[in-house]
Image (tube, rainbow, N blue to C red):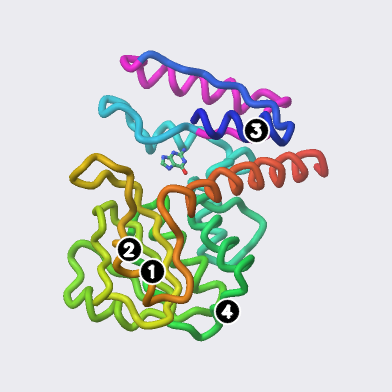
Amino acid sequence: MRNKIKACEEVGIRSLSHYLPANATQKEVIELVRALAADKSVHGILVQLPLPKHLNAKEILAEIPAEKDADGFCAENVGKLTLNDESGTVSCTPYGVMELLKRYGVSLCGKNAVVVGRSNIVGRPMVLLLLNADATVTVCHSKTQGLKDICARADILVSAIGKAKFITADMVKEGAVVIDVGMNRDAAGNLCGDVDFEGVKNKVSLITPVPGGVGPMTIAMLLQNTVTLAERAELC
Ligand code: GUN
C-alpha cells in the first residue's frame, strides 16, 4: 500500500487512504466502500487483500461498482476480460505482465504459454489475457499431474504459485521467457520468487527478477487502470 500511495503522488493522482482497525465489522467496511462509490470525486476504489478472516471479502468487493473497479476484480470486469472485451479494467499483476511482454517485444501469437497458479488475482486473468493475445495456453495448479514436463514445453512460463524457488532449470525450456510473479521468503528469510533465478537465468532468453520485476508493474497498471476509469467517467 505504501508503494501504491507513493506512486500516486509521483504521477499526480490524488489518493485517499482509509485504515480501519483489524476488528472492523463487515457493516463498517461496506459503509465505507458505499460512501466512496457514491463520491463523484473518486474515480477508482481498491480494497487491499487479504482481509481479516472475519470479513466476507466477496461481499465487500461486490460493493465496488464496475466503473470504479481499479483492481479489475468484479464479476463484470472479469466477464469482459473473458469475452475479450477491452472496455473493462484488468487485474493489475497479469496486466503488468502483458505490458512487460509487449515492451520487451515478446510475440505471443501461437506460442505455448504455461501459467502456474489459478488464483482469481493472477492465474485466471493471466490465462485469459494470454489467450486473448492468441497464445496457446495451459494452466497448471497444485493438483496438476506432470507439471514439470508441461512447464518444460513452455515458450512463455508465468509462475504465480507462491512457492520459493519451485521452478528449477530442468523445468524450463532453452530460450524460454520466464515471468516470476512469486513473492516468497527463502530459508534465510530473503525475498525471492517462485523461480530459482540463479539456476535458470543462463538457460532462458528473458527472465524477471524478484524483487524488481513484476512488482513495480502491478503498481504501474493500477495507476493506468485509475486513469482509464477517470477518463471514462469524464466522458460520460
Ligand atoms: N493483494 C495482493 N495483490 C493485490 C492486488 O492486486 N489488489 C488488491 N486489492 N489486493 C492485493
**Residue 151, position in %: x, y?**
30, 76
In the displayed orientation, state which residue is furthest to the right: 235
Crowding at mark 2 (Cα within 10 Å: few <14, some 14-19, many 20+): few
Give the labeled residue for mark 1. Answer: 201
Question: Which residue does the image show at 62% across and 38% down from the upper left?
Answer: 68
What distance separates the C-alpha of mark 3 from that of mark 1? 33 Å
Q: Which residues are magenta?
A: 22-46
Q: Secondary structure at mark 4?
A: loop
Name the foreground residue: 53 vs 161: 161
Name the foreground residue: 64 vs 95: 95
Kindly indicate the quadrant of the structure image that contains residue 108: bottom right
Nearest-to-viewer mark from 2 and 3: 2
User: How many numbered circles does the render carry?
Assistant: 4
What distance separates the C-alpha of mark 2 from that of mark 1? 6 Å
**Residue 182, position in %: x, y?**
35, 53
Is 120 in the magenta? no
Q: Is residue 55 above or below residue 71?
A: above
Q: Secondary structure at mark 3?
A: helix
Name the foreground residue: 146 vs 235: 146
Q: Secondary structure at mark 1?
A: loop
What distance separates the C-alpha of mark 2 from that of mark 3? 33 Å
Left or right for 99, reference 173 = right
Q: Are marks 2 and 1 in contact (CB under 8 Å)?
A: yes
Label 4 beta carbon within 8 A of ligand 1: no
Crowding at mark 1 (Cα within 10 Å: few <14, some 14-19, many 20+): some
Give the labeled residue for mark 2. Answer: 198
What distance separates the C-alpha of mark 3 from that of mark 4? 31 Å
Give the labeled residue for mark 3. Answer: 8
What distance separates the C-alpha of mark 4 from that of mark 2? 25 Å
The three-letter code of the residue at mark 1 reads: Lys
Give the labeled residue for mark 4. Answer: 107
The three-letter code of the residue at mark 3 reads: Cys
